[in-house]
Amino acid sequence: MIDPVRFERVARIDSTSSELMRRPFAAVPQPPCALLADVQEAGRGRNGRVWLADPAHALTLSVSVEREVDGTTLLGLPLAVGVAIVDVLGAHGAAPRLKWPNDLQVDGADGPAKAGGILVEVRQQGPLQRVVVGFGLNLSPTAGLDAARVGQSAGALFPADRAPARLPLARELAGAVAAAVGAFARDGLRPWLARWRALDALADLPVDLVRGDGSREPGIARGIENDGALRVERLDGTLARIASGEVSVRRRG
């Protein structure tokens, strides 16, 4: 059972996740902690990307959950966290989908647009493990996000006049994410699979698998394995199992 989340808010910081990761360990696991920043000067995404957020229209939050190391794998945790976040947002009227492995997408004027991202990091010291889940959400439309620097078009979860208040939403999300980490550590990904598959933004779409050297392999996204790996059907009909990497939707025509 996850203890109530201690909630902290700061006006400005380099990165909420960096702050939670660098805090010293105590002798025993500490209760979950959430850190909300109005402005992040060095917000981080996957693969060292910078996460840009307009403080008037976005939410940047990290949640730390500590536990004793028990040998269970955290592979697939970003998918479970994504479902937990989408379910909270859905209760407020948003309808994002999940793009493997860690993005939230909405429909934009020019196609799918990124409205949020999740980054899971782990630090271990002796018998204790700290899981830090950082995420950024574009709550309402803004011209302050430079799509060229973000790396793809930026979308918003809510219309400008219907975005929920940031602080109550942040508290709600923090509780849901902490609970998801605890449930995942206990039960794994299986309880989340059906919901994630229903939210799959890539299902049966032509995609390019982007490798570390920049090369691309075309295929068709065919959903996820039970451990969260992505299935991609190659052009010759064989299936590739992708445990990590970048996938982009291939434009038709």
Image (tube, rainbow, N blue to C red):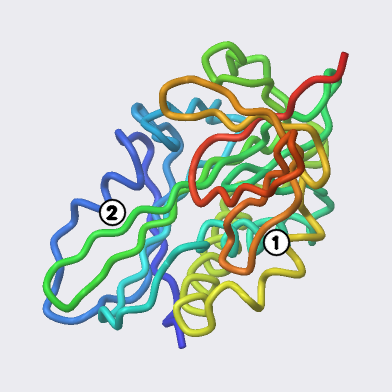
Residue 22 in the image: above or below residue 15:
below
Task: Point out the residue furthest to the bottom here.
Answer: 1
Q: Position of residue 31 (x, y in %)?
A: 33, 76
Q: Residues within 10 Å of mark 1 (few under 14, many from 20)?
A: some
Type of residue at label 2? Leu
Q: Secondary structure at mark 2?
A: helix
Towards the viewer: 4 or 117:
117
Q: Is residue 103 left or right of residue 149?
A: right
Residue furthest to the front: 236
Quadrant containing the C terminus in the rendered view:
top right
Residue on which the image places disc 2 = 20
**54 versus 179 height, above or below:** above
* Residue 225 appears left or right of 27: right
Residue appearing at x 41%, y 22% in the figure: 213
Check disc 1 and report the residue beneath it.
Answer: 88
- Residues under labels 2 and 1: Cα distance? 23 Å
Residue drawn at x 58%, y 13% as measured from the top left: 146
Q: Amino acid at mark 1?
A: Val
Q: Quadrant of residue 44?
A: top left
Q: Nearer the viewer, residue 79 or 134?
A: 79
Q: Position of residue 226 (x, y in %)?
A: 63, 69
Using the rendered view, name the quadrant where residue 39 is placed.
Answer: top left
x 52%, y 14%: residue:
149
